[in-house]
């Protein structure tokens, strides 16, 4: 009985924290998305498609993140019980791993869908500055060199990555 109450409490807290976290993360994601689209100089048609792709991606990612958080809460409950069931804990670990793999696959697919709407110059900018950034709450993770994550699009604020000739903040390129 106590275990059920504790599980319900943990799930409730998780859901509430997910909501707060998602609101904060979406704000960060939107700012980075806006910086990226300005930097890429998308035309009206590209911008519309970009927004559609991102909205679909955000919905898919949120669903998976919520599932992971629910499993993490259940795992915490199991791990902190007096008689921890290691088989159940390991099963949850495997389920979380599958969800994380699904998340990575969605991100890879999303990046390729975005690249399809770009011209060759925009692709280079996207690949070197946008696609490898940690967008928001880690939308697609920090999978590359992360050049120019800070202040992207603001030519007055160098990112400190002078070794990257494509960096829009390099004073040499302005």
Image: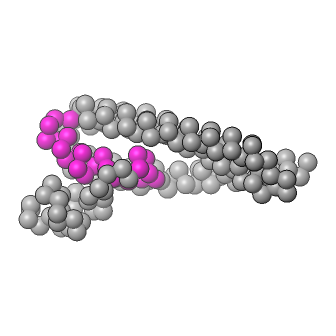
Residue 157 part of the magenta-drawn span: no
Q: Which image quadrant for residue 118?
A: top left
Q: Residue 139: give x, y in percent of width and height.
A: 43, 47
Q: Which image quadrant for residue 51?
A: top left
State which quarter of the image contains the C terminus.
bottom left
Residue 130 part of the magenta-drawn span: yes
Residue drawn at point x = 31 percent, y = 51 percent: 144
Q: Is residue 137 left or right of residue 31?
A: right
Residue drawn at point x = 21 percent, y = 61 percent: 154
Residue drawn at point x = 62 percent, y = 47 percent: 69
Q: Which image quadrant for residue 152?
A: bottom left
Q: Residue 145: give x, y in percent of width and height.
A: 29, 56
**Which region shows up in magenta?**
118-141
| For residue 132, above or below residue 107 | below
48 and 65: which one is in front?
65
| For residue 59, above or below residue 29 | above
Q: Residue 65: give x, y in percent of width and height.
A: 55, 44
| For residue 113, above or below residue 75 | above
103 and 47: which one is in front?
103
Residue drawn at point x = 22 percent, y = 57 percent: 153
Q: Is residue 45 left or right of residue 16?
A: left
Residue at the limit of the structure toward the right, as seen here? 1
Describe the colour scheme in one phrase: one colour
Q: Is residue 81 visible?
A: yes
């Amino acid at each position: 009985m106590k275990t059920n109450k504790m599980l319900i409490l943990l799930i409730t807290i998780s859901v509430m924290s997910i909501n707060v976290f998602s609101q904060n993360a979406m704000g960060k994601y939107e700012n980075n998305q806006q910086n990226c689209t300005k930097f890429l100089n998308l035309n009206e048609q590209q911008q519309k498609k970009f927004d559609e792709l991102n909205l679909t991606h955000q919905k898919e990612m949120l669903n998976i993140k919520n599932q992971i958080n629910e499993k993490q809460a259940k795992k915490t409950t199991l791990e902190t019980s007096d008689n921890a069931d290691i088989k159940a804990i390991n099963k949850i670990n495997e389920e979380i791993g599958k969800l994380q793999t699904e998340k990575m696959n969605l991100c890879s697919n999303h990046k390729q869908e975005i690249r399809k709407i770009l011209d060759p110059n925009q692709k280079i900018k996207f690949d070197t500055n946008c696609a490898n950034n940690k967008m928001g709450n880690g939308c697609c993770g920090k999978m590359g060199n992360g050049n120019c994550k800070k202040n992207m699009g603001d030519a007055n604020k160098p990112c400190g990555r002078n070794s990257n000739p494509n960096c829009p903040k390099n004073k040499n390129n302005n």
